[in-house]
Amino acid sequence: MKLRSLLILSNLLSLSVILIFLIISYVQMSIPPRTSLSLIGITLLAGAVSFLIHLGITSPLLKAVKQMISDSKMIGEGQFEARTSLSGPKEIRELALQFNDMAERLNTLFQQLKQSERYKTELIANISHDLRTPVASILSFAEALEDGVVQDERDRIEYLGVIKRETLRLSKLIEELFELSALDKESMPFEPSASYADDLLIKSLQQFELKLKENGLKVEVGIEENLPAVYAVPEAIIRVLTNLIQNAITYSPRNSSLGLTVEKRESGLLFSVSDEGPGIAIEEQGRIFDRFYRLEKSRNKEHGGTGLGLAICREMVERHGGEIGVISAPGEGSEFWFTIPFNRKEESI
């Protein structure tokens, strides 16, 4: 039975009981028949007016309920932007408010799900491309060597060099995919210890000594004195610094400068790596920490990398309770920064 029918039926039943008792009372009283008929008529008229007033009062309630039913159907059909009006009695308004809050949460979850699906599709496409490209190169060069197409020894060595580079590239991609997977599942051990900024920078820079000389790059290091230790996983922080330094070297013009600084902040240490490269457009700065996102749309092999390095950096920094970001403008170089708090307590993940 519909709510409207139930309300009308209950009102009619209550009015009928009242009218019956009143009419019986009039009949039992010593009232002249004409007066009795008049009282009965007035009572029936009052009952009719009461019924109409009841319909008028319950009409907004029924309208609000119907609206919520309609909005519920819209949400059931996937129209999560539907919202019901906050009208009617207090209880109905509270119910409508809860309904709208629920719809808002559903809409947010749905948008996140859509974004996740788009991300998943893009991720699969990027992984497929990045796996297919080196495999195709390795296959083509291997077939050329196998078929005896390459006779010159120098060409043969060059072909083998290409195979080796592509194999290393493929190996790096697979390694970073496993690393990201471990971070996602939080299965990577997290065993922080007291770490000092100067030691982290030295260990990070040592591996780039030869490359810096080859590119004629000058490194300017600025570390505040008497910096306290941070509670972190040294290997993870070195991994972040290594990736940022590698990117700075890759995008820096020859004979330019790189900057590495560490400063004390109220809650932790601020690390930054700057270069004099081409810079990054503002509209791209929000996506460079996304997985597989590259600034080079053509996926240039020399600079494109795997597109996973900055994503891994963000995961590692956030696991320490810090933040990571970039300050850049086209033609003005870039400064990548991240923070590591002092008071990160040891945990087992």
Image (spheres, rainbow, N blue to C red):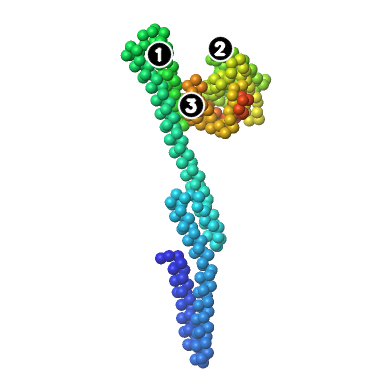
Name above or below for residue 218 compared with residue 72.
above
Q: What residue would you read off at disc 1? A: 159
- Measured from the top left, where is residue 311 in percent x and y? 51, 29
Which of 266 and 65 lies nearest the eye of the viewer?
65
Which of 271 and 119 lies nearest the eye of the viewer?
119
Q: Looking at the image, which residue sits at the far top?
A: 153
Name above or below for residue 296 compared with residue 45.
above
Element marked by disc 3: loop
- Measured from the top left, where is residue 255 in percent x and y? 61, 15
Tell us which disc is closer to us: 2 or 1: 1
Closer to the chain start, of discs 3 and 1, is 1
- The residue at the point 57 percent across, 26 percent down is 231
Q: Disc 3 versus disc 1: distance between alpha carbons? A: 23 Å
Do the CB atoms of the residues marked 3 and 1 lie less than 8 Å apart?
Answer: no
- Measured from the top left, where is residue 52 in percent x and y? 51, 74
> Is the residue marked by circle 3 packed among few (<14), some (14-19), or many (20+) residues within 10 Å?
few
Element marked by disc 1: helix
Whether residue 258 is visible, yes or no, is yes
Closer to the chain start, of discs 2 and 1, is 1
Q: Disc 3 versus disc 2: distance between alpha carbons? A: 26 Å
Tell us which disc is closer to us: 3 or 2: 3
- The amino acid type found where label 1 is placed reads Tyr
- The amino acid type found where label 3 is placed reads Ser
Q: What residue would you read off at disc 3? A: 298
- Can you tell which quarter of the image residue 209 is in? top right
- The residue at the point 52 percent across, 71 percent down is 54
- Can you tell which quarter of the image residue 166 is in? top left
> Is the residue marked by circle 2 packed among few (<14), some (14-19), or many (20+) residues within 10 Å?
few
Q: What residue would you read off at disc 2? A: 214
- The amino acid type found where label 2 is placed reads Glu
